[in-house]
Image (cartoon, rainbow, N blue to C red):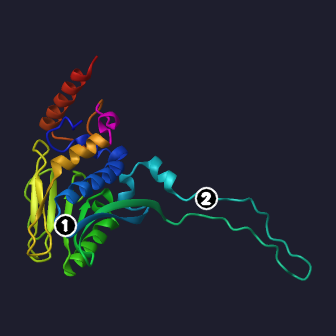
Amino acid sequence: MSSPFPGMDPYLEDPAVWEEFHHVFITECMYFLSDQLPNNYIAKINERVELVSRNDAAAAQYLPDVAMLRERPVHQRQASEPTARAGGVAVAIAPVTIPSVESLEVREGYIEILRLPDYELITSIELLSPRNKYGEGLGENRHKRRSLVSRGVHVVEIDLLRRGRRTELAQPLPPGHYYAFAFRADRRPDVAVYAWGLRHPLPGISIPLQAPDPDVSLELKDVVNSAYDRGRYARKLRYNGAPPEPLSPEDSAWASEIVRSVAADTRP
């Protein structure tokens, strides 16, 4: 089942489901690309683990109950004050375990396109998360991207979150609600920018390979619809309320009409 929205479903931006959707999207993206790539390329999923400070602006973008579950438990034991034995030897005191400030663990999958037979990294594809758009993660993401591109690796960033800071370039971005950026190592400092609105169909974006091999197209509409179907988001999303990220009055009325139409169609 596809999303009732013609483009990006704004209800997928709900923090209650975004982290899971991120994983499902990356998996479906890998499957889609694997069907498009020439035989001398492979697409694989890699994962990084980030420790986010509870004081970082990104931490507030994840569900508080999820954050609490991920914090390392605090084991406290009531200990009496140290006493001295004969000869002045102190009694051993059991330590108290307290989590550090960096206690929220965030796991993020991303895609690597490798060229055979040497498994050379050619392109890295990211679906941006709150970690990439708030707090310390902003600078870390820029540094990671710059490092990859300087090594000759193409970087593609897909931004399906309206909240948070946008990728900053030398000139203002074209208007849009959602974006994709292709940082091609062979065309720097130029960046291919895709921008589209909430009501627009999700576009296809060109994924660069190693020259002279031609680009392959990543059809975001197909990937998102497949992720929506396999993740059973028609059941999981909170369509009985407003989208988690506020819309303009016009877009809000438009989205409400779509949700009402779906509810009427599914009524017994």
Q: Residues within 10 Å of mark 2 (few under 14, many from 20)?
A: few
Residues drawn in magenta: 231-239
Residue nearer the viewer, 208 or 142: 208
Direction top: furthest residue: 268
Q: Is residue 168 magenta?
A: no
Tag of residue 54: none
Q: Residue at x 15, y 50 (%)?
A: 177
- Name the spot of residue 228 as percent of width and height, x first: 27, 42
Return the residue at label 1: 39
Classify mark 1: helix, strand or loop.
Answer: loop
Q: Residue at x 50, y 52 (%)?
A: 68
Q: Residue at x 32, y 38 (%)?
A: 232
Return the residue at label 2: 74
**Which corner quadrant holds the C terminus?**
top left
Mark 2 vs 1, N-terminal side: 1
Of the two numbered discs 2 and 1 in the rendering, the one whose residue sits closer to the viewer: 1
Eyeballing the image, is 41 above or below 150? above
Say if residue 66 shows up in the picture: yes
Q: Amino acid at mark 2?
A: Val
- Name the spot of residue 265 as percent of width and height, x first: 21, 22
Eyeballing the image, is 213 above or below 243? below
Classify mark 2: helix, strand or loop.
Answer: loop
Say if residue 124 shows up in the picture: no
- Name the spot of residue 17 as percent of width and height, x first: 35, 45
Q: Residue at x 47, y 47 (%)?
A: 65
- Name the spot of residue 148 as percent of width and height, x first: 24, 76
Q: Left or right? Give the position of 195 relative to 3.
A: left
Q: Left or right? Give the position of 5 relative to 109.
A: left
- Res 190 quadrant in image: bottom left
Direction right: furthest residue: 86
